[in-house]
């Protein structure tokens, strides 16, 4: 079996070639074949098929494509027989196939073999290998398949095909078959007029065939095309080839054919007097020899070490410089090798490749937090596009954030580059502006790729960012560079879990990771998907063969030691983060120092989502200064923007920030917590001013700027996770002032949590609050904590436990002489008995509450007791009696503007109408209740009201409406997860469905 990628994608088996199937199924086969026998993660497959716009059903689609491929690859496999060719595992799929059975992989191997043979001057064998390779090509690679992977792989294969065609033309020349080379090169150049190597080879082939005038016309045509299309002059190698033909020099290394005699008047005096020794001209791949002069060497050559290349009077090359006669390509080739273990990033690489290779973008920036893999991706990109830059590749590590190493200055970088481009060391300008001008002059007319790795920021590289068109700059930085002119910036995020697992498999062994995929995914999460952390984790696993992935997960799960564990040798996540933070902390700019302080304070009080208001409270500043500090942290990629002016910290950054322990941290935490408490109380009052807010413990702070019920509700909903997190952290510490503020914050959230039915948050917060009150021996706080824990337990349908806490609250209130607390506890006990359908006890507790509430003048308590009485009477099947207290509640609530209790009165009066057999009249009650309860976001009241209205519609025979409303009620019940109300919804939906079934089967009326 063979996989075919060099043309329409297909499979060749003894039964024939199969190329059918959906295009994306073929794309999955191409991805698996390109990586065989290594696995490809599900995430990589989805990203390769759809990029960032994957549909929700992407995973299911991949499963379908794989199933179809298995039928083609293993047509005789039994239904219950496990697959052996396309197998699953490690979060993806693996094509178990010899790479040489993939035509594109075989093609690559043959081309590499031809290169090696050519380097050993075995040109006939090289030509044979290239003919076999090109014979595999059946059309455009990957046959027009869609998706980011197919597009990127198609470009790569097309580039490889062109390189192979160039190598074949070179081999034809060196085996004396220049005429055959002319035929193939004419067709290739017609399709690729901007490819200078093709043009150079055609010129040499024509020249060797005795057709120099045509060769010179090819050069002239190329100069016009490059100027018109790209605005650049021909590269160094093409210009030297032109000069060789003008001089009439022979082409070295080419056998047979005829070479025109050299016109004697075309040599310079120095050349004819023997002052220059022949040397191989740059870029001609060893075919052309040209005389070496100081001017030629300075203009065309550069050593890999960056030292200047000069020529001596006797034609010898100076010691320590690159000898153009010894190297085939003396233009600078400074790229370090690309990392073999780089995984993921297919979408980013495709976008970057398009920017550099297709759109010719002059400046591309790769930004992201420390350890995210910017340098590795930049090198991968550079190696992918380097063939488009025939005049060389320059690379420098600027050390912008390397701990203990001073950053290179722009002048130092310019000096290195100018020496690499052939400027003698003593001729490099020492003034920055002059060096930049010389840099631009040297780059004019050249096609050079420049990689500036680890820039400290935009100022660090500004003098290097304006070379002439034709040069491409790739810059990596932890800072944003988007403000630079003509900059296209790609920001890197952490790896997805499947990509992270693939990286761990590469470093620690695929079998080891595949043995426990759940732990591998957890390890990836503990590393925040950060490639540096994953690389360290993989290396540690490799160093400890006895460890399982779970063993390392256990070590990293301890937040106190996680950063310590993520260190091996000189590589450490902590060091990478320290260098970024220190650059801000030690900066002369106030905004940088404010950003550094804010990060350290965010380690003291963690907010899942960081806002300007919370940051201002921590800093003790105005919101403008806090916003500037947050923006600066975002520019440095130490906080991550999320949405609507909100930010978040990755866990590793949070743990690093927690180690900083800044001066004044306690005062900052107190300020922030006081702001949270004041704002939550203010928002709750705005939402419903008739609910009694807990005022102990007291706080004195300016709340958030909110001035309407809608703003209050929206603020509480948006900040709920932050407020709960802050309350829990505060109550978990030992500082009494901070713990009391945590209790105050938990209490201030009670009404919002109970109305929105945030059961778990309410229970966890108030159980912590109760523990704090016991530790502080504060019975007044304990009374409230018992009441709020009881309310959360009631919401969780844990009625027995709820009763115990209500009774404890009642006992404490009586002991403290707190009559308000006593009537509240009595009302809560009435409600608890109502839920348990103990209506007699409900009446007893409610009437006791009513006496106290009237005595101390609490209208809210009076109305609550009357609501309980009306409910109990309705439960006792005494609807006529229930109507009286409910009518009193309605009148009082309307008079005071209490929307919640007015809505509840309408709701229960609607249920009373149903009990009296008046469903038509109940509808208006339920409509009023829906509007009022919705205005205060009382979710359980809304659900109860939906059920009452559904019953009314059912009894009126409006069954389609009833069915639709019952469905909405079921959806809300599923969200609230209250078993009692879920059961009531099921009963009512069943009644509606039965009624619908009866009407559909009943005979038509005569």
Image: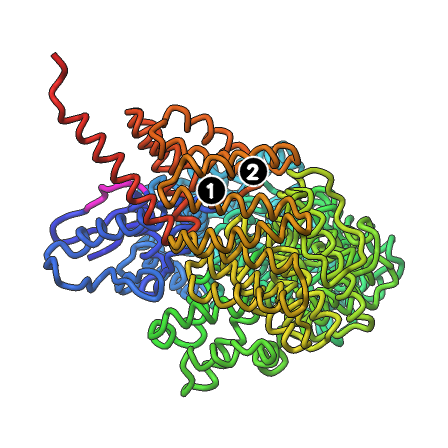
Task: Decide whether residue 21 is among the magenta residues.
Answer: yes
| Left or right of 323 in this view: 175 | left
- Tag 2: Cα neighbours inside 10 Å, few (<14), some, or many (≥20)? many
Gap between marks 2 and 1, in whole Å? 10 Å
Tell me the crowding category of disc 1: few under 14, some 14 to 19, or many 20 or more residues within 10 angstroms, Cα based: many
Discs 2, 1 touching: Cβ within 8 Å? yes
In the picture shown, does residue 744 fall above or below 319?
above
Q: Specify the farthest residue to the top.
A: 1006
Q: Is residue 155 above or below residue 734?
A: above
Residue at 38% across, 38% down = 947
Is residue 414 visible in this depiction of the protein? no
Q: Is residue 360 left or right of residue 554?
A: right
Task: Give coordinates of residue 798: x percent, y percent.
Answer: 42, 62
Foreground pick, 91 / 448: 91
Q: Nearer the viewer, residue 783 or 58?
A: 783
Write down the quadrant of residue 567 in the picture: bottom right
**Secondary structure mostly seen in the magenta stretch:** loop
User: Which quadrant, please, contains the C terminus?
Assistant: top left
Instruction: Give the structural element (helix, strand or loop) at label 2.
Output: helix
Write the residue at 47% across / 68% down. Answer: 341
Residue 836 horizontal/vertical position (percent)? 39, 56
Q: Which mark is residue 50?
A: none
Which disc, if any, is residue 889? 2
Q: Which residues are magenta?
A: 18-23
The secondary structure type at the circle numbered 1 is helix
- Can you tell which mark lies on residue 870? 1
């Amino acid at each position: 079996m063979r996989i075919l990628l060099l043309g329409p994608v297909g499979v060749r088996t003894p039964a024939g070639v199969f190329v059918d199937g959906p295009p994306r199924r073929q794309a999955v086969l191409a991805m698996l074949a390109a990586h065989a026998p290594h696995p490809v993660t599900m995430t990589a497959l989805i990203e390769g098929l759809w990029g960032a716009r994957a549909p929700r059903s992407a995973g299911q689609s991949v499963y379908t494509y794989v199933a179809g491929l298995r039928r083609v690859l293993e047509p005789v496999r039994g239904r219950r027989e496990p697959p052996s060719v396309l197998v699953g595992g490690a979060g993806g799929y693996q094509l178990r196939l010899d790479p040489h059975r993939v035509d594109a992989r075989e093609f690559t191997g043959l081309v590499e073999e031809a290169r090696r043979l050519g380097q050993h001057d075995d040109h006939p064998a090289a030509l044979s290998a290239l003919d076999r390779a090109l014979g595999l090509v059946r059309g455009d690679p990957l046959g027009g398949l869609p998706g980011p992977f197919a597009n990127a792989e198609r470009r790569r294969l097309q580039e490889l095909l062109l390189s192979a065609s160039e190598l074949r033309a070179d081999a034809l020349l060196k085996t004396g078959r220049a005429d055959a080379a002319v035929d193939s090169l004419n067709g290739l150049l017609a399709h690729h007029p901007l490819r200078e190597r093709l043009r150079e080879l055609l010129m040499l082939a024509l020249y060797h065939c005795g057709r120099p005038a045509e060769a010179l016309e090819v050069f002239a045509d190329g100069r016009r095309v490059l100027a018109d299309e790209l605005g650049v002059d021909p590269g160094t190698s093409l210009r030297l080839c032109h000069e060789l033909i003008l001089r009439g020099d022979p082409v070295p290394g080419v056998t047979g054919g005829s070479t025109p005699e050299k016109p004697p008047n075309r040599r310079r005096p120095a050349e004819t007097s023997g002052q220059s020794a022949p040397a191989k001209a740059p870029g001609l791949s060893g075919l052309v020899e040209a005389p070496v002069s100081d001017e030629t060497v300075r203009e065309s050559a550069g050593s890999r070490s960056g030292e200047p290349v000069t020529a001596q009077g006797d034609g010898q090359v100076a010691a320590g410089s690159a000898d153009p006669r010894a190297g085939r390509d003396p233009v600078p080739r400074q790229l370090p090798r690309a990392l073999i273990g780089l995984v993921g990033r297919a979408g980013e690489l495709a976008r970057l490749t398009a920017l550099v290779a297709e759109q010719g973008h002059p400046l591309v920036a790769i930004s992201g937090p420390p350890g995210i893999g910017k340098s590795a991706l930049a090198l991968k990109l550079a190696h992918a596009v380097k063939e488009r830059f025939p005049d060389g590749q320059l690379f420098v590590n600027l050390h912008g954030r390397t701990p203990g190493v001073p950053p290179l200055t722009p002048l130092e970088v310019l000096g290195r580059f100018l020496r690499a481009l052939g400027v003698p060391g003593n001729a490099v300008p020492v003034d920055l502006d002059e060096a930049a001008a010389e840099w631009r002059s040297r780059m004019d007319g050249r096609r050079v790729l420049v990689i500036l790795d680890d820039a400290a920021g935009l100022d660090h590289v500004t003098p290097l960012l304006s070379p002439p068109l034709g040069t491409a700059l790739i810059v990596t930085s932890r800072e944003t560079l988007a403000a630079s002119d003509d900059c296209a910036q790609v920001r890197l995020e952490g790896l997805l879990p499947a990509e992270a697992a693939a990286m761990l498999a590469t470093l620690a062994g695929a079998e080891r990771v595949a043995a426990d995929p759940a732990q591998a995914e957890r390890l990836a999460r503990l590393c925040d998907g950060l490639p540096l952390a994953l690389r360290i984790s993989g290396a540690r696993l490799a160093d400890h063969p006895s460890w399982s992935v779970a063993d390392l997960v256990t070590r990293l799960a301890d937040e106190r030691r996680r950063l310590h564990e993520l260190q091996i040798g000189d590589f450490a996540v902590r060091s990478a983060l320290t260098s970024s933070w220190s650059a801000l902390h030690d900066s002369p700019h106030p905004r940088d120092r404010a950003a550094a302080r804010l990060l350290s304070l965010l380690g003291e009080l963690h907010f899942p989502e960081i806002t300007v208001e919370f940051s201002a409270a921590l800093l003790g500043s105005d919101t403008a200064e806090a916003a500037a500090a947050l923006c600066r942290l975002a520019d440095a990629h130490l906080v991550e923007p999320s949405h609507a002016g909100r930010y978040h910290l990755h866990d590793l950054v949070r743990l690093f920030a927690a180690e900083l322990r800044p001066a004044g941290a306690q005062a900052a935490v107190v300020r922030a917590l006081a702001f949270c408490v004041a704002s939550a109380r203010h928002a709750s009052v705005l939402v419903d001013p008739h609910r009694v807010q807990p005022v102990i413990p007291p706080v004195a702070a300016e709340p958030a700027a909110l001035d309407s019920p809608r703003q209050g509700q929206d603020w509480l909903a948006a900040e709920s996770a932050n407020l709960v997190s802050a309350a829990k952290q505060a109550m978990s510490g030992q500082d009494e002032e901070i713990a009391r503020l945590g209790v105050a914050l938990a209490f201030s959230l009670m009404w919002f949590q109970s109305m929105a039915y945030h059961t778990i948050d309410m229970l966890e917060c108030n159980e912590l609050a109760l523990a704090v009150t016991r530790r502080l021996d504060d019975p007044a706080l304990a009374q409230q904590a018992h009441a709020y824990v009881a309310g959360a337990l009631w919401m969780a349908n844990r009625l027995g436990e709820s009763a115990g806490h209500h009774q404890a609250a009642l006992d404490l209130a009586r002991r403290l002489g707190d009559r308000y607390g006593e009537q509240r506890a009595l009302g809560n006990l009435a409600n608890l008995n109502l839920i348990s359908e103990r209506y007699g006890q409900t009446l007893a507790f409610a009437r006791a509450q009513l006496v106290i509430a009237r005595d101390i003048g609490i209208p809210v308590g009076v109305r609550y007791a009357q609501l309980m009485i009306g409910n109990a009477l309705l439960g006792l099947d005494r609807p006529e009696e229930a109507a009286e207290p409910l009518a009193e509640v309605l009148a009082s609530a309307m008079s005071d503007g209490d929307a919640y209790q007015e809505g509840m009165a309408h709701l229960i009066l609607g249920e009373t109408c149903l009990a009296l057999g008046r469903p038509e009249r109940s509808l208006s009650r339920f409509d009023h209740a829906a509007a009022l309860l919705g205005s205060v976001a009382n979710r359980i009241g809304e659900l109860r009201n939906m059920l009452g209205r559904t019953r009314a519609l059912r009894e009126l025979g409006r069954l389609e409406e009833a069915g639709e409303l019952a469905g909405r009620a079921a959806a809300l019940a599923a969200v609230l997860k209250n078993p009692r109300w879920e059961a009531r919804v099921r009963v009512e939906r069943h009644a509606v469905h039965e009624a619908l079934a009866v009407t559909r089967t009943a005979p038509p009326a005569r």
